[in-house]
Image (spheres, grey):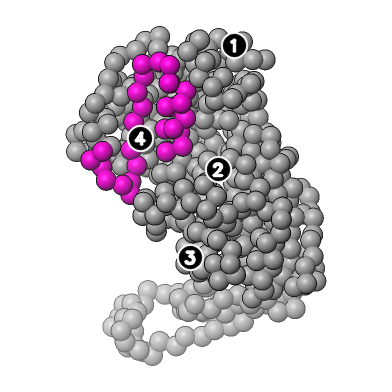
Amino acid sequence: MTFKDLKLRGELLRAIKKEGYTEPSPIQEKAIPEILENRDLIACAQTGTGKTAAFALPILNNLMIDRKPKTIQALVLTPTRELAIQIFNNFKNYSRYIPLRTACIYGGAKQGPQVAAIERGVEILVATPGRLMDLMRQGIFTLEHITTFVLDEADQMLDMGFISDIRKIVSYITKEHQTVMFSATMPSKIEELARELLTSPATVKVAPQSTPAETVEQSICFTKKEDKNLVLSQMLKEENVKNAIVFTRTKHGADRLAKDLEKEEIPAVSIHGDKSQGQRQQALRSFKSGRVNVMVATDVAARGLDIPALSHVFNYDIPEESEIYIHRIGRTGRAGATGEAISLCSPDEIGRLLDIEKLLNRELKEIETQWSVKVDRVRPRSSRRNYGNYGNYGKYQRYRSGEVYRQEDMRRRDNRKWNRNSDHTENQQGQRFEYVRRRRTVKKEVKL
């Protein structure tokens, strides 16, 4: 199938050709016809599959049929600034030969230029939830003329706590509109949200749920936590590492690791949520231009960064959630290109690794260095789920030889009133007595 077979306008076909697209990707082939027919759509597609074009091209095509100049008719909602900027640039490229304008609004930047762009008149608005709500409260614009609403990266919206904002935003849109939802994963809460927002939607899935691209070679290196810097530095100095993103779990860890790599004469920058928009854009420019070939990032950068031809992804820390691993390594091996993802795993992270391998349904290939350690792929007792606080005393259940010992408070069950500020209580007859707290140990077998 070709883009011409999808019945797109000639101006869009010219723009597609200029972008270097030769044939539609699977998600584009399945989603574009549904959106052209103005049907609601829910699509499950991993990052790097061309899903931005899958909704941008048919939206532009439909707006040219029923255009209302300088009126916001399409709203694209994204969770992060980087993703909003990426989608905005794609819309600009695809609409280069048609008279449709796009504006982009996001937090972390001055709102003056963003407001000015909207007031000049746009038909398409790309936004993050926070800045969108802020400008709407100021009365800068309304959503009463929206005909198409796109919710991109819906699962990340859920993780970042934007669901209530999404519901409020949808309440400002006229009921007669098309809703398109894209998500890399499809947990039950996303399915529930889809039932709430979409009407008889078409469903498109182009890959099994939580499956990384087949072009990404994945491997694992077992090492001590204190040796991770040495292992990473050695790997980054190898000739086949052209450029790489290194993911850490914390913002402080990202800054510290970038400084440590600089000491090893490896040019590196860090990017995370505490950086200002100017700092983040400067870091991205340095990385894309090749002035530095290593970018240390937190999971805020796991989606929304459009970095072509990324050769490697390193997981300095094993992520706590298996799905985050999929999003991280999705930065490489995009659009059919090959890539490599290497994870550094310390012995205390084995439990997380086993969760990832369970999701992938296979073991990751092990690579060895001079700092490698031998690790059994068995979930350690310390990583088993902690049952949390018990009662008012903060006593945790303890694992001992496969048995659980639990402290129980045997309070007397009658109508006594207990004054917590006193060592005494009184019953309904007003008789005072010492409150005696008795405990007993309950032995419970645990099936391992």
> From the viewer's perspective, is 83 left or right of 209?
left
- Of callouts 1 and 3, which one flags the residue occurring earlier in the amino acid sequence? 1
**Which residue is denoted by mark 4 in the rendering?**
104
Camera sees residue 360:
no
In 3D space, how far apart are the residues under numbered discs 2 and 1 (Cα atoms)? 28 Å
- Please say if the residues under marks 2 and 4 sit with CB atoms less than 8 Å apart: no
Q: Nearer the viewer, mark 2 or mark 1?
A: 2
Secondary structure beneath dot 1 equals helix
Q: Position of residue 366 (x, y in %)?
A: 79, 59
In 3D space, how far apart are the residues under numbered discs 1 and 4 (Cα atoms)? 29 Å
Residue type for callout 4: Cys
Q: Position of residue 223 (x, y in %)?
A: 72, 70
Which quarter shows the N terminus? Answer: top right
Image height of 260 relative to 334, above or below = below
**Which residue is denoted by mark 1 in the rendering?**
4
Residue type for callout 1: Lys
